[in-house]
Amino acid sequence: MIKNLKTSFLGTTRKIESAKGGCIFLFKYASKTATDPNPLIIMISPPWIGKNGNKYFTGVNLNLIKPEIARQIIKEFGSHPVGSVSYKDLQSYAAQDPSCCVRTYFVRKVRALHKVGVTHSL
């Protein structure tokens, strides 16, 4: 897990798409089936509506990737806008296949959303 990241509190997921200059987010995830209650993700899709009418977003949980690779991914892609980084981008960049770390998050279960500021001194 990467520590000591500079974050900006957004509060709710309504502010995800308006968050300028970055697609790295940290939040509390209040799901009974969550494998990580405090994910640090690089968002690979903007929020979308499922067939059931619920809102979701998809991201790669960087807490589940080796810390040195996660730092490299943050440096390379962290300042890109939400939805502009694809799974394929991450797969070609990371020495580890990120498929093990792709998660879809139910927006109503997200709490205390923070946008992570990207610095080159990670």
Image (cartoon, helix red, strand yellow):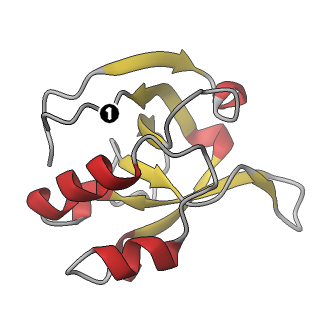
- In this orientation, which residue lies closer to the viewer: 37 or 24? 24
- In this orientation, which residue lies closer to the viewer: 62 or 88? 88
Residue 67 percent coordinates (x, y) = 12, 57
Q: Name the residue: 20% across, 80% down.
A: 95
Q: Residues within 10 Å of mark 1 (few under 14, many from 20)?
A: many
Residue 81 percent coordinates (x, y) = 59, 43
Tag count in the figure? Answer: 1
Which amino acid type corresponds to the residue marked 1 in the rendered image? Val
Q: Name the residue: 42% across, 34% down.
A: 27
Query: Circle 1 is placed at which residue position?
Result: 118
- In this orientation, which residue lies closer to the viewer: 60 or 52? 60
Q: Quadrant of the C terminus?
A: top left
Q: Name the residue: 35% across, 47% down.
A: 39
- In this orientation, which residue lies closer to the viewer: 92 or 44? 92
**Residue 63 placement: quadrant:** bottom left
Residue 83 percent coordinates (x, y) = 64, 54
* 93 relative position to 70: left or right: right
**Residue 34 placement: quadrant:** bottom left
Instruction: Say which element carries label 1.
Output: loop
Q: Name the residue: 69% across, 51% down.
A: 46
Residue 104 percent coordinates (x, y) = 57, 63
* 107 relative position to 94: left or right: right
* 65 relative position to 28: left or right: left
Indicate whether 111 appears above or below 106: above
